[in-house]
Image (cartoon, rainbow, N blue to C red):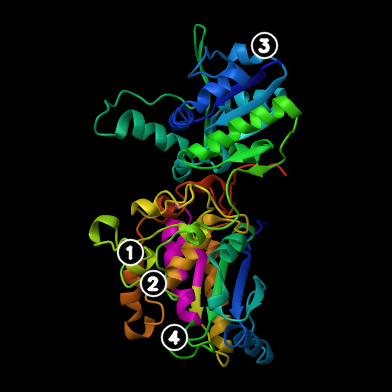
Amino acid sequence: MTMTFEPKITAFLCKWCGYAGADMAGTSRIKYPPTVTPVRFPCTGRIDLSHILEALRESDGVLIAGCHTPNDCHYIRGNYQAFKRITVLKTFLKQMGINPKRVRLDWISASEGRKFAETIHDFTYELRDLGPFVMEQNEVIQ
Amino acid sequence: MKKAKFAVGYGSICGGCDVAFTDVGTKLADLAEIAEIVYWPAVVDGKIERLEEVSNIDVGVYFGAVRTDEHETVLRLLEEKSAILVAFGTCSCYGGIPGLGNVETSESLLATAYSNAPNTRAEGVPSLEEITIEELKMPKLRDYTSSPADLVEFDVFVPGCPPPVQSVIDLIDFVKDYRENGNVPDAFFLAKEGTVCEYCEREKPDKISIEKVMRVHESDLDEDECFLSQGVLCLGPVTRAGCGEEPRCTSKNMPCRGCFGPTPKIRDQGTKFLSSIASSIMLGKEKQISEEELMRLLTEGIIDPVGLFYRFALPVAIINRKHQEK
């Protein structure tokens, strides 16, 4: 029997929508793969690109989920900040030879437990196809 | 009094750091008075055997990044023999411009240089491994460029591409001080703590919103206004100050390129700036245009994030070398 590769996903979820959506998936008892490690953020606008890159070094994919555009954000336009940052990040990832699909941005509201589960399903399948992400880095003493 | 022994070793360099030394003018005569130059390929005979022979170097200075095995040999020799080890120039502090080679693999770099470039004849690409022909050795080209500061521990850092005249003068004063009093400075940066913006005298608005990313030649620059508010990308907010009383590029009406590296509070200069620039684009006006339009603005405005934001500090970034993925 061959072992199938199970990807590791780090999910950055905004506390008002993404995290509440994940909660909804739990309370509604919707099944989804155990591949995701959620991290709660106050808002997707708080997520700095260095958070995403550091997370990517330790996992196979990073999911960012927040409130729907244009008007759902609790802080008015935090979701747009995330949208803009991740668009630029994808250009950077392409240049460094990393498949930009490993970073995924989705809008999931507090009531969309089913969408959260589907997103995890979908992302897990996608990452299975892409394979494990092994980051070769320069050696650093310390 | 005995002269201090002074040695300069080379990594992957362009030669600009040597020129920076000559820029100090007559002060250079002081260096000759207080120090005996035991090794410096551009000044005295520079065979590696010479560096292997000498011992008890007082001040060892390293220029450039580490790209080949030879570069590391020189670096390790200097580390072993010097009382004070100085990282001179951005390349030895953060990897510098040669570090941009990390966006390609070594194979593709050689292929471009020896065969694919339009002005070369496609007659084979040299091997990556060490080549020995009779007594001559060609060192192995590494897979990536590293920042020397990641490999050894330096006592003094002199950032700048090239370091400003004042830094060289300060360094000569260090040599003098060491020779007279034996003071060894400890992990000292010849730069200021704050950012370039703190010292830049241009007028800065409270909130910066960039409607279109412009290049210098595309815009009619106002000489007294912040570059960022005019849409020209300037690395001032994330770059360490100290290149002059007034930042040397912004005072000459050119945006900061970030050669002094990240400020002490920043882990990664490029990523931090990428985040802040992305959020400044159409700040507060995102809802006036469609998401597709916003995406187009971002992808067309920032075409080459690595070259622009990681120009001097790619080898010390969070993701710092080309990843090979199918």
Tell me where residue B32 appears, x and y as whole percent: 56, 19
Would you say the residues marked 2 and 3 are in contact, meaning their CB atoms lie under 8 Å apart? no
| Residue that carries the numbered disc 4 in the rendered image | A69
Question: Taken as a whole, is the magenta stretch helix, strand or loop?
Answer: helix
Would you say the residues marked 3 and 1 are in contact, meaning their CB atoms lie under 8 Å apart? no
Q: Which residues are magenta?
A: A78-104
Q: Are marks 2 and 4 on the same chain?
A: no
Q: Is residue B285 left or right of residue B199?
A: left
Asked if residue B88 can be seen in this view, the reply is: no
Would you say the residues marked 2 and 1 are in contact, meaning their CB atoms lie under 8 Å apart? yes
Which of the image's four quarters has the C terminus of chain A?
top right
Q: Nearer the viewer, mark 4 or mark 3?
A: 3
Relative to residue B129, is residue B248 depicted above or below?
below
User: Looking at this view, is B219 or B135 the one in front?
Assistant: B219
Tell me where residue B30 appears, x and y as whole percent: 56, 23
Q: Residue A83 falls in which quadrant of the image? A: bottom left
Chain letter for mark 1: B
Task: Compute the Cα span from label 2 to label 4.
Answer: 17 Å
Give the residue type that dot 3 points to.
Answer: Glu
Q: Are marks 2 and 1 on the same chain?
A: yes
Q: Are marks 4 and 1 on the same chain?
A: no
Which mark identifies residue B110? none
Q: Nearer the viewer, mark 2 or mark 4?
A: 2
| Residue that carries the numbered disc 1 in the rendered image | B301
Task: Compute the Cα span from label 4 to label 3.
Answer: 68 Å
Relative to residue B73, is residue B105 depicted above or below?
below
Which mark identifies residue B281? 2
Task: Compute the Cα span from label 4 to label 1.
Answer: 22 Å
Give the residue type that dot 2 points to.
Answer: Ile
Give the residue type that dot 1 points to.
Answer: Gly
Give the residue type that dot 4 points to.
Answer: Thr
Chain letter for mark 2: B
